[in-house]
Image: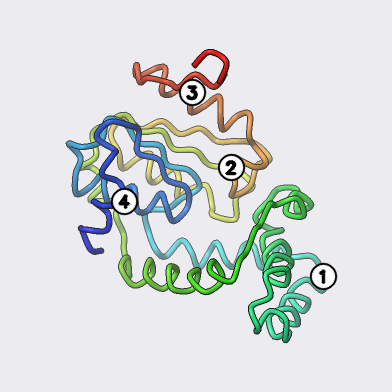
Amino acid sequence: MADQPAQNTMAHLALHAGKGHSWGGILAMHYGIRHPDRLRSLILCSTTASVSAFGEMRETYEAARAPGEAEALGEMYSSEALQNGDPKAYEEFWRLYFRPYFADPSLADGLDLLFTPNTIRNSSLVAGGVLGSIGEFDLHEDLEAITCPTLVLHGDADPMPLRYAEQIRDSIAGAELVVAPDVGHWLFVDGTELFRSSILGFLAGIGAPIMDENPDKR
């Protein structure tokens, strides 16, 4: 993984908690391994330290699809509207695609997905750049370099199996794991309150400054 993009993206982490969800968690772990002295704390959510986890994750969420869903996705993907970059077609496709990411698949119907021609064009470039820069990886042995307080969050209904979060916890000295019951891959959507309280409690426990959420008090 190229070092400079990580530095540019996360240079502020010397003053704040490093945070990453899913692919963002992988980036945060890479940064923490390379620059442990710049992290005061680390929060990892719904992520893995090994590329091998993604094959199992895909098998899990594809097996959880409702009857006819895979066929519908195939038809939508090959449709003229999606192939021509219609934002509405992309929104419909991804809402259906993400349904097995949730313990309650209907939550995907309420996702606020705002696609534009620019985001549609750039998303494939960004995905290709991320995959190309990370490549094959297994960070477990390298995670011992991270010494800052670390919180790992994971939903027990996440298609990313829980043991990958447990392996991260076991690889970082003193790391804390919080498992959210009946919550899928996006804890901040279907486990909002536990997600929020866990992070605020973690930051308070390490004496980190917490921004006042009430704008009237600012």
Residue receiving disc 2:
155
Q: Quadrant of the N terminus?
A: bottom left
Indicate the secondary structure of the residue bearing disc 1: loop
Residue receiving disc 4:
9
Q: CA distance from mark 1 to mark 2?
A: 24 Å
Q: Is residue 204 left or right of residue 144?
A: right
What scheme was used to colour the molecule? rainbow
Q: Which mark is residue 200?
A: 3
Q: Is residue 33 left or right of residue 53?
A: left
Marks 2/4 in contact by CB < 8 Å: the verdict is: no
Residue receiving disc 1:
67
Q: Amino acid at mark 2?
A: Gly
Image quadrant assignment for residue 206: top left
Q: CA distance from mark 3 to mark 2?
A: 18 Å
For label 4, the crowd category at 10 Å Cα-Cα, with few meaning under 14, some 14 to 19 and many 20 or more, is few
Expressed as whole percent of the image width and height from the top left, the position of residue 201 reads 48, 20
